[in-house]
Amino acid sequence: MRLFAFCIFFLSASTLSAQTESVKKINVTVAAMYSSNASYYGQTTAEKLPYVLANATVRFPVGLYLSAGTYKLLNIGSGLSETDLGIGFEHDFSERLSVGLGYTKSFFPSNSPLLQAANDNNLDLSVGWKWPWFTTKLETNYAFGSENDVFLGIENSRSIELGQLFSEKDALSIEPAIEIVAGTQHFFNTYQQQKIKNNNGNGKGNNNGNGNGNVVTITEPATSFNLLSYNFKLPLYYSRASYMAELSYQFSVLGAEAITEAKRSQSFIGLGFYYQF
């Protein structure tokens, strides 16, 4: 699940927690979500991959959390598309400074079409700083497995309260954000090799006409650290004391050096529901 859905879940879960009275107890948050396409730091495959997601996170008073989740691609296969287990630590050092460190282990089927399937381990460090008018979040991620990739993102967001919708016990808000992501793309080579293997197994592939069977060309990803994407996000939240619903829109534009087989600009629509015990 990490990265395209995991980030959204924790952003929403944190927003819900901030709107709930802080108490020293163990909190359990369950989440269900739909997205119109799978995004890996704004990048997608040529084939659209809508999915549904389920996640549960247990948060302890000391800042430690444990999570488990799974999601299902709606147009690929009949089984689960990924499951994951995570552990991490989050702490607010002051009203302005917050830091988070987490590790996620993901399990993908062997024929997964997802871009991130090559990197089933993710180590993430994030630092947030609240300015008077907006919040800046700096996040770095080391993704490793069949390949090794490093990503760095910076996001500026602002939470805007829109008031109550039905009663004084609910709240409506939006949180527009702009995110810039840079990183490596070794994962793309593994993705292409897996795709070619799957196609050849189905009798597909490119033939050069010389009788040698399927001949394919693999685009080697650049090993340099490049700008990958610009992401513009606009989530709308409706929350009460213990639950929150979310309607989100994201528009992503790839950087000039980003390797892709899909369109260089994409739109994503998501729906989410979060409940905290």
Image: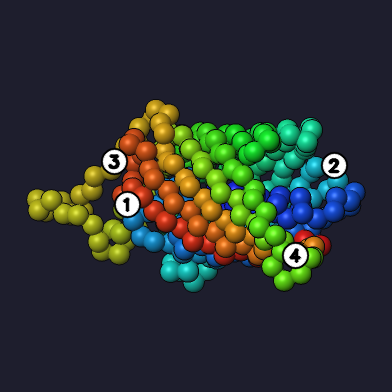
Question: Residue, x 43% and y 62% (percent of image)?
Answer: 49
Q: Can residue 83 be seen in this view?
A: no
Position of 104 with respect to 202 (left or right) is right
Q: Nearer the viewer, mark 4 or mark 2?
A: 4
Q: In which quarter of the image is residue 102?
A: top right
Q: Which of 124 and 208 is in front in this view?
A: 124
Label 4 to label 2, Cα distance in Å?
Answer: 28 Å
Q: State the CA–CA distance, disc 1 to disc 4.
A: 39 Å
Relative height, residue 12 to residue 225 (above, below):
below
The C terminus lies in which quarter of the figure?
bottom right
Q: Is mark 4 on a helix, strand or loop?
A: loop
Residue at 89% over, 51% down: 23
Return the x and y of residue 110 as percentages of the image width and height: 47, 56
Whether residue 109 sits left or right of residue 238 in the image: it is left
Q: Where is residue 170 in the image (x, y as percent from the top left)?
A: 75, 65
Q: Mark 4 points at which residue?
A: 170
Please name the residue that numbered disc 1 is placed on. Answer: 263
Dot 3 lies on which element?
loop
- Give, as a three-letter code, the residue at label 1: Lys
Under mark 2, the amino acid is: Val
**Would you call the spot at circle 4 few (<14 residues within 10 Å), some (14-19), or many (20 or more)?**
some
Q: Which is in the foreground here, disc 3 or disc 1?
A: 1
Disc sitting over residue 62 in the figure: 2
- Where residue 156 sits in the image (x, y, percent)? 57, 39
Relative to 96, 117 lies left or right: left
Q: What element carries label 1?
A: loop
* Amino acid at pointer 3: Thr
Disc 3 target residue = 219
Mark seen at residue 230? none
Cα separation, mark 3 vs mark 1, equals 17 Å
